[in-house]
Image (tube, coloured by chain):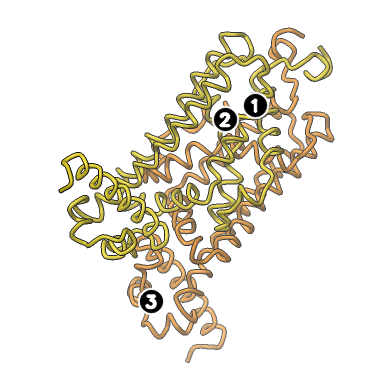
Chain colours: A yellow, B orange
Amino acid sequence: MPSSEELERNSDRRHREIREAAIGIFLDNGYEGATMEDIAVRAGVSKQTVYKHFTDKQSLFADIILSTTGDMSALVGLIAASLGDTRDLENDLEHLAKAFLVALMQPRVLRLRRLVISCADRFPEIATAWYEQGFEKVLGALATAFRALADRDLLVVDDPGAAAEHFVGMLFWIPVNKAMFTGDDDFAATHDLAPAANSAVRVFLDGYGFRRNKSQNGGQD
Amino acid sequence: MPSSEELERNSDRRHREIREAAIGIFLDNGYEGATMEDIAVRAGVSKQTVYKHFTDKQSLFADIILSTTGDMSALVGLIAASLGDTRDLENDLEHLAKAFLVALMQPRVLRLRRLVISCADRFPEIATAWYEQGFEKVLGALATAFRALADRDLLVVDDPGAAAEHFVGMLFWIPVNKAMFTGDDDFAATHDLAPAANSAVRVFLDGYGFRRNKSQNGGQD
């Protein structure tokens, strides 16, 4: 007979499996097209089991959307690790920018993004929570890092929040839109992201008063 | 008896009315939820009349989505008018930036954007055409303007296309995402867009070597 710990482990595992199946089904079929039946089949469990773990389709949807904001925590950690005590800001910021692009331009992240946007009309509270718990946490971490760089006199930053917005805006607006509108979700695998990352970093650093070296700073100092 | 010109005028008018009704129905109900019946009712015509003007739902959808890219022509004209022979680049670019934000943050534009994104999986060719005929025309016009400003030694621009991307990225990434994810499509009416416009312009100009005046350029020249 299985012990109560084993039963609990099994239940946790099944919970994760249902979630994973649900993400796949919602991404493939959209919210409208997804059924609890399909999710049960993909997870290899009965429909009753799905309902035992999740009350209904909407709460399962909310659960899986919000579970993906955890992916952003890795980026938040990366910001602190890259910029915390940097000795070569330009180089470290280029690496960070490229890592950001690679992370957000993954097919699954792009498809999830499209799914959340397409449901924002109907479930504004889910999409808003996703934005706040994912997106805005990354912005907050970037703002903190830029403030610290200003304290070290490496950048001139009046408004660290605006600086964070400008940084991600220059990085993401074009590639994310291209992917959103062309449906090309394999962007990261088919494009070299380094030139765009480096070009955004250069403009960001010049725009925020970074003094690379005298000959590069307008050539007139 | 109506003349053939009158008949043609009536047919043109009806075509426009069906289109307008279709935009409303697609925005309200999404592609899946929209029916030719609903569109006919909203346009005040019979279903047969709708089918006489548009073969089927998909071609009506393609027609109305692509018809909205004409809205971008106004922005393209504005770019040339604002920057063509500017005597005060900072001021003119601030006005342009604010006009861009106001134009793109209208409820109808935002809802249309959400609709196109949500259909990009299913109709990549329609969404791609929308992106290319709208978005990329504006980027092209901006790139041309920035190249001309570099020729006048007002900016230092190696890659005008990248400069255009950075300019719109800093302007739009945050407000458009906020609207996309929170469902707050009334953004332009409820927010003062000038501070964000001005702040993006400042960083853009500094990032692209604009020499405002010596005391503002890092304070050390």
Which of B10/A67 is in front?
A67
Chain of the residue displaying label 3 = B
Q: Which mark is residue B202?
A: none
Q: Position of residue B123 (x, y in %)?
A: 52, 66
The image quarter containing residue B50 is: bottom left
Which residue is labeled 2 in the image?
Answer: A166
Residue under the point 30% across and 64% down: A41
Q: In 3D space, how far apart are the residues under numbered discs 3 and 1 (Cα atoms)?
A: 49 Å
Which of the two discs, 2 and 1, labels the residue nearer the N terminus? 2
Callouts 2 and 1 close, C-beta under 8 Å: yes
For mark 3, what is the residue? B36
- Mark carried by residue A204: 1
Q: Is residue A118 left or right of residue A101?
A: left
Q: Please give left or right for residue B95 compared with residue B208 in the image.
A: left
Q: Secondary structure at mark 3?
A: helix
Q: Quadrant of residue B158?
A: top right
Q: Residue A7: where, in percent of width, then height?
A: 19, 45
Mark 3 to mark 2 CA distance (whole Å): 43 Å
Q: Chain of mark 2?
A: A
The total of numbered circles placed on residues is 3
Q: Does residue A45 appear left or right of residue B112 in this picture? A: left
User: Is residue A42 or residue B208 the one in the foreground?
Assistant: A42
Tell me if residue A130 comes above or below residue A57 in the rendering. above
In this view, the residue farthest toward the front is A1
User: Which chain letter goes with mark 1?
Assistant: A
Label 2, residues with CA under 10 Å away: few <14, some 14-19, many ≥20: many
